[in-house]
Image (cartoon, rainbow, N blue to C red):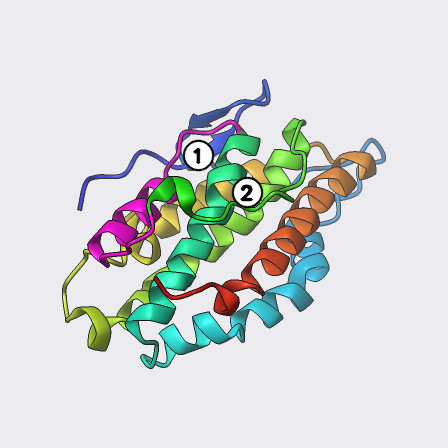
């Protein structure tokens, strides 16, 4: 598997760049009181949809090592259809969509990429804070990817990486990528309006992702 680029994080100008994991320093408001934990706000606002996706039939079948090839192809194609417009809305280099395209090729998916249905309802992510919130969805979902990847052993073969690059993701540096993201969250403005916009970016992205994934099993097997 090719070495992945460094974790994508938001810099002060609102663009995405690679950044090292920094020390997380608690933010304080003008009154000197510790700012509410934005991480806790994000977790609380997205817990319900996170739980529903954890029990999504496709992901559950991967987790239980019971998914068949046709359904797995459909699931990967559905994920590809989300991450192509999501990465475009985030103005970041295609990473997850590239992994998914490679997985589809390895799985022998017969439909050409340009014919794979694309999600048309990815939210507008036109600010630094909205994009930071949206990254909570992408970076957080990567944490469970490696566990899901192991559930594909019966289908793909043990130690075979082709066909599950999306779930393997950044591999051993997945945790570092998550900590780097959390450092960016901690460094965000403590203003309630900023927190609200970040949470809005996460909840809107999660909603679009869930709605799109709900249609995975209705795709025709090709």
Q: CA distance from mark 1 to mark 2?
A: 9 Å
Identify the residue at horizontal 19%, vertical 41% (top origin): 2
Q: Residues within 10 Å of mark 1 (few under 14, many from 20)?
A: many
Q: Secondary structure at mark 2?
A: helix
Q: Which residues are magenta?
A: 91-111
Q: Are marks 1 and 2 in contact (CB under 8 Å)?
A: yes
Q: Residues within 10 Å of mark 2 (few under 14, many from 20)?
A: many
Does residue 186 appear in the picture of this structure? Answer: no
Q: Residue furthest right?
A: 31
Q: Is residue 168 left or right of residue 134?
A: left
In which quarter of the view is residue 167 placed? bottom left
The C terminus, quarter of image: bottom left
- Disc 1 marks which residue? 8
- Disc 2 marks which residue? 135
Foreground: 165 or 189?
A: 165
Counting from the top left corner in percent of width and height, residue 23 is at 48, 38
State the count of labels: 2
Q: Secondary structure at mark 1?
A: strand
Counting from the top left corner in percent of width and height, residue 114 is at 39, 39
Identify the residue at horizontal 82%, vertical 39% (top origin): 192
Q: Is residue 8 magenta?
A: no
Q: Is residue 194 left or right of residue 50?
A: right
């Amino acid at each position: 598997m090719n070495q992945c680029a460094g974790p994508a994080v938001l810099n002060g100008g609102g663009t995405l760049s690679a950044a090292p994991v920094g020390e997380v320093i608690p933010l304080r408001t003008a009154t000197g009181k510790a700012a509410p934990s934005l991480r806790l706000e994000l977790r609380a606002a997205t817990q319900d949809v996170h739980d529903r996706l954890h029990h999504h039939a496709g992901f559950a079948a991967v987790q239980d090592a019971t998914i068949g090839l046709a359904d797995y192809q459909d699931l990967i194609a559905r994920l590809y259809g989300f991450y192509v417009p999501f990465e475009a809305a985030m103005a970041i280099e295609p990473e997850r969509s590239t992994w998914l395209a490679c997985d589809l090729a390895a799985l022998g998916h017969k439909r050409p990429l340009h014919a794979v249905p694309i999600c048309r309802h990815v939210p507008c992510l036109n600010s630094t804070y909205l994009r930071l919130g949206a990254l909570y969805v992408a970076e957080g979902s990567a944490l469970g990817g490696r566990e899901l990847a192991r559930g594909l052993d019966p289908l793909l073969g043990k130690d075979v990486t082709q066909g599950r690059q999306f779930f393997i993701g950044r591999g051993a540096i997945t945790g570092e990528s998550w900590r780097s993201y959390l450092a960016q969250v901690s460094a965000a403005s403590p203003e309630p309006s900023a927190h609200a916009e970040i949470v809005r970016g996460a909840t809107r992205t999660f909603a679009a992702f869930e709605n799109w994934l709900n249609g995975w099993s209705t795709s025709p097997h090709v």
